[in-house]
């Protein structure tokens, strides 16, 4: 066991203090991007964070988990880019931080004058950031084109509300573009129903690769009659046309006379079921004025954000935290209509009775952080989300991998649905019959492969994995279905399958399926089968079992969006076993130090994080260092808990937190539906899910003096949980001791049961590491092999 010398501690403390107090986490937000605080928690949120450098967030209007995300699209592949200077339209559907074009359906744009262009890239309106502002549930921009038009957006769960203030003109237009979006539209229909209403049906597909099509139905109701209207098909504009269907560039325009009344309001309702569903959603949620809708959205966000109350820390750190918390509540999204109907993955209409049906499942990302945060702060919704995933299995025949709307995209690899659902079970969200239903679906998924006629790929490499104990890396294998293939990433897939097997083993044991538990627990050790002792790293194996690709772990093949260096720590179910493979704690510590550039980090944490760790949001190859911009090694900073050096986890975590700021480029990589944001929130609080799929929370020093969590009493009888770290600072950041409701707590982790039955976790902090958390039994124990305490 090694201990840092006093000189290193003084240097690290002084430098990190300068960073956190005077640099990244305290950099002022761009004035154009900040609406100004008013004392409410919603005033601390900056929706523009992540809108630059491919963070791929959106600044527009949404309510928590809403079906609608009404937001500007500027021509970036995923929607809005802060560096663009034209807006092509305000689309109704967006996902926070996805890496490929998705959504952007029905971009609507106010213009003036004659309609001479039908391509949104050509009729796009200019704007400047000094005329733009946003806060949760509200967006406003002054368009400098077309004589100057102010556009305001707000939302309910299933409707988007627009308010346009035009110059005085008899040719004030609103363009409803049905043919262009962020993905590929294959067929669209537009109908002018009456003098105030336009209805559309949009069928499209996409997201990284072409996948099965889905249809979105919309109805838009204006607050006053049109002066005139028409449609376009390609470049042909037909005044007075009431409707048409087309497969290309296509849409409708409506015109108003604003010489006396310059304001036009419109409400767009969505449904993934049918036109009648959109109309019902409009009637259910579209009756309020714009200002009342905006106030209701703000109140909804205030309630969500109010679940976390902080004391201490700078105002900028609080803005960064609450902005991350905001993004964590944006998805998954409501998929059922106000009457409970939804379109299942069997393309049939079903009804959710007694729960809300959700959709949009970026599971490869969210199973690591966001699912656990939602289980803690939004357990009722989390339970319905788990129920929704089980409905996908029941109606579509198989559990999802990466679901968008009503279709499977098969993007990403491994078996992320297993830790997602076992997490819901371990957090107490699935009980009794539902727990057994979940187990049966997971067992089918873990032991089989979807049939050829299923759109799902599931655990595609399961047959060789079950036969040989590893998923082979097969170059050039034709893809049987759209999306990613597990055979393209055999090494990382083996690790992902083994992780899932461990989590399923624990669930099987808890539910009394003992034979299954033994079988899955044995499979949880399959990570050992791709360990190359000659290199000391994991390595892909071909179909014959031979190691393949470069022996250099920084140039390895067969790993999805990462290298062997980054994936070597993805064994949270058995870190003691992994550490033994490496050669013991001392060798593991040295390797971790190299991986994090630890000596450089303690001297200059911010510079190390930004210049050594970060290579770009999509640069995954040829790297032997931590990549905080992507998912495979998100848990890695907490691996030090298992080497007996918990203070190093704090050093690394706090350095990584400097990458999150309250400016447009203040996101580390793609947000991936709240994954990165949830990492920031949980790491700031000091309680992190180190074994995704279980009820284990690793501990590190919080960055706030106090955090009060308001919890749902139906799942957490205490109703609240408080984390205290009096005097915590960039210098006093090392844990000296921990007390749980006043009793000494020497382990570096908690379980969810502890959160349910206790009220207060108190960290005593100081300027130097202590022996807290260094005992042999202090680290989280392996998962799946034995009962857990």
Image (cartoon, rainbow, N blue to C red):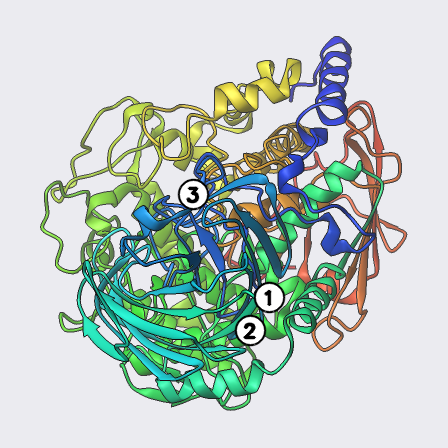
The earlier-in-sequence mark between 1 and 2 is 1
Q: Are marks 1 and 2 in contact (CB under 8 Å)?
A: yes
The earlier-in-sequence mark between 3 and 1 is 1
Q: Are marks 2 and 3 in contact (CB under 8 Å)?
A: no
Secondary structure found at label 1: loop
The earlier-in-sequence mark between 2 and 3 is 3
Q: How many marks?
A: 3
- Quick check: 204 left or right of 194? left
Give the Cα distance between marks 2 and 3: 27 Å
Instruction: Using the rendered image of the protein, determine whether residue 185 is visible from the camera's viewpoint.
Output: yes
Q: Which residue is mark 3?
A: 86
Give the Cα distance between marks 1 and 2: 6 Å
Q: Are marks 3 and 1 in contact (CB under 8 Å)?
A: no
Of residues 246 and 215, the one nearer the viewer is 246
Q: Give the percent coordinates (x, y) of residue 555.
A: 28, 25
Of residues 519 and 377, the one nearer the viewer is 377
Which label sits on residue 98?
A: none
Q: Give the percent coordinates (x, y) of residue 590.
A: 52, 20
Q: Residue at x 14, y 73 (%)?
A: 453
Q: In which quadrant will I find the C terminus?
A: bottom right
Quarter of the view holding residue 474: top left
Q: Which residue is mark 2?
A: 157
Secondary structure found at label 2: loop
Q: Which residue is mark 1?
A: 63
Q: Residue at x 18, y 54 (%)?
A: 464
Nearer to us of marks 2 and 3 is 3
Instruction: Using the rendered image of the protein, determine whether residue 367 is visible from the camera's viewpoint.
Output: no
Q: Residue at x 29, y 21 (%)?
A: 552
Q: Give the percent coordinates (x, y) of residue 546.
A: 16, 35
């Amino acid at each position: 066991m090694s201990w840092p010398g006093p000189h290193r501690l003084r240097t690290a403390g002084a430098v990190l203090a300068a960073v956190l107090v005077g640099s990244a986490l305290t950099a002022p937000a761009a004035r154009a991007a900040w609406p100004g605080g008013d004392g409410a928690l919603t005033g601390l949120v900056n929706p523009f964070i992540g809108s630059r450098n491919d963070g791929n967030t959106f600044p527009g209007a949404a309510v928590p988990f809403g079906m609608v995300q009404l937001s500007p699209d500027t021509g970036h592949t995923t929607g809005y880019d802060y560096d663009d200077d034209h807006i092509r339209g305000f689309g109704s559907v967006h996902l926070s931080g996805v890496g490929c074009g998705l959504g952007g359906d029905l971009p609507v744009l106010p213009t003036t004058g004659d309609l001479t262009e039908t391509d949104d890239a050509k009729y796009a309106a200019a704007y400047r950031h000094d005329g733009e502002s946003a806060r949760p549930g509200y967006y406003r921009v002054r368009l400098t084109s077309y004589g100057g038009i102010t556009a305001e957006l707000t939302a309910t769960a299933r409707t988007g509300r627009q308010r346009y203030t035009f110059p005085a003109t008899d040719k004030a237009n609103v363009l409803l573009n049905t043919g262009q979006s962020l993905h590929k539209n294959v067929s669209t229909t537009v109908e002018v129903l009456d003098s105030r209403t336009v209805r559309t049906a949009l069928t499209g597909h996409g997201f990284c690769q072409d996948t099965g099509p889905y249809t979105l139905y919309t109805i838009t109701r204006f607050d006053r009659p049109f002066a005139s209207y028409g449609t376009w098909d390609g470049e042909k504009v037909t005044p007075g046309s009431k409707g048409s269907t087309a497969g290309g560039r296509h849409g409708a325009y409506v015109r108003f006379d604003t010489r006396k009344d310059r304001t036009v309001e419109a409400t767009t309702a969505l449904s993934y079921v049918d036109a009648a569903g959109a109309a019902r959603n409009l009637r259910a949620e579209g009756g309020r004025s714009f200002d009342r809708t905006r106030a209701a959205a703000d109140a909804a966000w205030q309630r969500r954000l109010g679940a976390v109350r902080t004391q201490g820390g700078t105002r900028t750190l609080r803005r960064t935290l609450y902005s991350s918390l905001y993004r964590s509540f944006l998805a998954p999204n409501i998929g059922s209509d106000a009457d409970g109907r939804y379109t299942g993955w069997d393309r049939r209409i079903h009804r959710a009775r007694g729960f809300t049906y959700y959709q949009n499942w970026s599971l490869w990302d969210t199973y690591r952080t966001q699912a656990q945060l939602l289980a803690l702060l939004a357990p009722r919704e989390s339970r319905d989300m788990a129920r929704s995933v089980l409905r996908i299995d029941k109606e579509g025949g198989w559990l999802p991998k990466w679901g968008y709307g009503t279709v499977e995209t098969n993007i990403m690899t491994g078996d992320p649905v297993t830790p997602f659902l076992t997490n819901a079970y371990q957090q107490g969200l699935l009980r009794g019959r539902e727990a057994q239903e979940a187990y049966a679906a997971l067992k089918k998924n873990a032991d089989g492969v979807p049939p050829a006629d299923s759109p799902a790929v599931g655990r595609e490499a399961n047959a060789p994995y079950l036969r040989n104990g590893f998923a082979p890396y097969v170059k050039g294998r034709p893809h049987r279905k759209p999306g990613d293939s597990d055979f393209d990433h055999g090494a990382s897939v083996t690790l992902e399958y083994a992780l899932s097997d461990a989590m399923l083993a624990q669930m099987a044991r808890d539910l009394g399926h003992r034979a299954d538990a033994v079988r899955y627990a044995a499979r949880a050790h399959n990570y050992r089968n791709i360990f190359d002792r000659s290199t000391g790293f994991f390595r892909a194996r071909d179909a014959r079992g031979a190691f393949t690709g470069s022996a250099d772990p920084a140039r390895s093949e067969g790993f999805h969006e990462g290298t062997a260096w980054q994936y070597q720590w993805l064994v949270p179910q058995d870190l003691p076993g992994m550490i033994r493979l490496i050669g013991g704690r001392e060798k593991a510590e040295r390797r971790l130090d190299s991986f994090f550039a630890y000596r450089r980090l303690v001297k200059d944490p911010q510079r190390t994080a930004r210049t050594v760790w970060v290579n770009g949001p999509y640069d995954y190859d040829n790297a032997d260092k931590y990549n905080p911009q992507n998912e495979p090694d998100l848990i890695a900073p907490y691996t030090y808990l298992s080497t007996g050096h918990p203070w190093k986890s704090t050093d690394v975590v706090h350095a990584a937190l400097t990458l999150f700021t309250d400016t447009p480029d203040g996101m580390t990589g793609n947000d991936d539906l709240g994954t990165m944001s949830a990492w920031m929130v949980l790491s700031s609080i000091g309680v992190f899910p180190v074994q995704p799929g279980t009820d284990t929370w690793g501990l590190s020093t919080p960055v706030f003096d106090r955090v009060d969590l308001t919890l749902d009493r139906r799942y957490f009888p205490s109703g609240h949980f408080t984390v205290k770290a009096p005097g915590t600072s960039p210098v006093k950041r090392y844990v000296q001791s921990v007390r749980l409701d006043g009793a000494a707590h020497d382990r570096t982790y908690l379980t969810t049961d502890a959160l349910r039955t206790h009220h207060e976790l108190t960290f005593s902090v100081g300027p130097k590491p202590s022996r807290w958390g260094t005992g042999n039994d202090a680290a989280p124990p392996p998962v799946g092999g034995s009962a857990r305490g």
